[in-house]
Amino acid sequence: MAMSATGVLYFGLLADDAIAMWDTKTTSSFTIGQRIISRDHVLTQWPDSFAFDEDGNFWCVTNMLQNFLNNRVNIDVPNYRLIRTRVGVRNYQYYENGTAPELPDFTAGADSVNFALATLLAAILVFVAK
């Protein structure tokens, strides 16, 4: 599942071979608020990986894992599919307007980490050389 910056949760419905969404801002009830946006018993079997890109596209990887689990994989047909649709938003790590929060700069500890790793490496080499 994946959450958009606008509060929409996208998720897979394995039993329905479907991809659904729930807009958390318009309804507080998951059971009555979910809506199927894609159902295809051939193309969307086992939807399990979801992502947003920087251009506002929503991506979903589907596969036929149930065939693998039942030892019925057909190598003559596509067993994995990458599906894309335009939703016009980014993931939950961005603001609704598409901008990102300022991230802190953590360079202060870099020198001490490098020193510690160099010291550890030297100690290992001395131990191995004996």
Image (cartoon, rainbow, N blue to C red):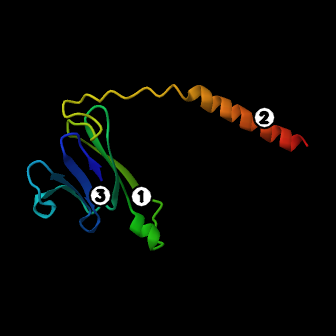
Q: Amino acid at mark 1?
A: Asn
- The residue located at (39%, 28%) in the rendering is 104
Residue for badge 3: 44
Left/right placement of residue 95 relative to residue 59 reads: left
- The residue located at (40%, 54%) in the rendering is 80
Residue 108 position within the rendered picture, expressed as x and y whole percent measured from the top left: 52, 25
**Most foreground residue, 20 or 30:** 30
Q: Residues within 10 Å of mark 3 (few under 14, many from 20)?
A: many
- Taking the view exactly as shown, the residue that stands out farthest to the right is 130
Q: Amino acid at mark 2?
A: Ala
Position of residue 84 relative to residue 39, above or below, is above
Quadrant housing residue 72: bottom left
Quadrant housing residue 43: bottom left
How many numbered circles are shown? 3
Residue 121 position within the rendered picture, expressed as x and y whole percent measured from the top left: 74, 36
Residue 25 position within the rendered picture, expressed as x and y whole percent measured from the top left: 11, 47
Left/right placement of residue 81 relative to residue 24 reads: right
Q: Secondary structure at mark 1?
A: loop
Q: CA distance from mark 3 to mark 2?
A: 53 Å
Residue for badge 1: 79
Q: Secondary structure at mark 3?
A: loop
Q: Residues within 10 Å of mark 1 (few under 14, many from 20)?
A: some
Q: Which mark is residue 57?
A: none
Position of residue 100 relative to residue 8, above or below, is above
- Mark 1 and mark 2 lie on one chain; the one further toward the N terminus is 1
Q: CA distance from mark 1 to mark 2?
A: 49 Å
Q: Nearer the viewer, mark 1 or mark 2?
A: 2
- The residue located at (19%, 45%) in the rendering is 7
Label 3 close to label 1 by CB (< 8 Å): no
Quadrant housing residue 110: top right
